[in-house]
């Protein structure tokens, strides 16, 4: 079982891993791990919603066990806030448009340097990055 703090640490570590892979010219691994950082961050947001001794709602629990970014945004109760923040900050909105379709399937695909760098930047931009936005909610 993973807790919120561990998920936060995993998100940060996956970003470092993705950066190292970018520097090593390993585009596919970098792409996958950059998206995985977002998944871990969103799951940390979801973990914040749970209470230690509460028995989770079955549907809620089942929806948490996914790699789909859009589902995790919804389960985390972040869809409305994200929509307003994207409207107020078009650069953040553009970052979300790059990230939103990521799921676990990229581990079975080959990605190019431009694709990997585009996703990594959308995730890690210090001002308009998706992970920075997520950190404000975890």
Image (spheres, grey):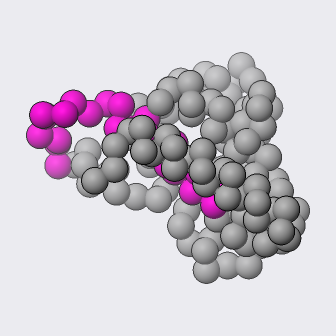
Tell me if residue 116 can be seen. Answer: no
> Which residue is found at the position 17% from the left and 49% from the top?
58
Q: Is residue 92 left or right of residue 49?
A: right
How far across and how far down the image is residue 40, in percent? 49, 49
How far across and how far down the image is residue 62, in percent? 26, 54
Magenta region includes residue 53: yes
Q: Is residue 100 above or below residue 103?
A: above
> Which residue is found at the position 76% from the left and 65% from the top?
21
Tell me which segment is drawn in magenta.
33-58
Magenta region includes residue 98: no
Quarter location, residue 56: top left
Quarter location, residue 128: top right
Q: Is residue 47 left or right of residue 17?
A: left
How far across and how far down the image is residue 137, in percent? 50, 26
Total residue callouts: 0
By secondary structure, the bulk of the magenta-drawn segment is best described as helix
């Amino acid at each position: 079982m993973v807790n919120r703090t561990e998920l936060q640490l995993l998100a940060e570590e996956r970003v470092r891993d993705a950066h190292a892979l970018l520097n090593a010219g390993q585009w596919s691994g970098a792409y996958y791990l950059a998206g995985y950082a977002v998944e871990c961050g969103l799951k940390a947001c979801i973990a914040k919603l749970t209470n230690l001794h509460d028995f989770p709602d079955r549907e809620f629990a089942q929806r948490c066990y996914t790699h789909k970014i859009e589902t995790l945004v919804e389960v985390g109760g972040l869809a409305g806030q994200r929509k307003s923040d994207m409207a107020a900050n078009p650069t953040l909105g553009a970052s979300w448009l790059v990230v939103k379709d990521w799921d676990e399937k990229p581990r079975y695909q080959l990605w190019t340097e431009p694709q990997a760098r585009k996703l990594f930047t959308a995730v890690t931009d210090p001002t308009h990055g998706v992970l920075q936005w997520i950190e404000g909610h975890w």
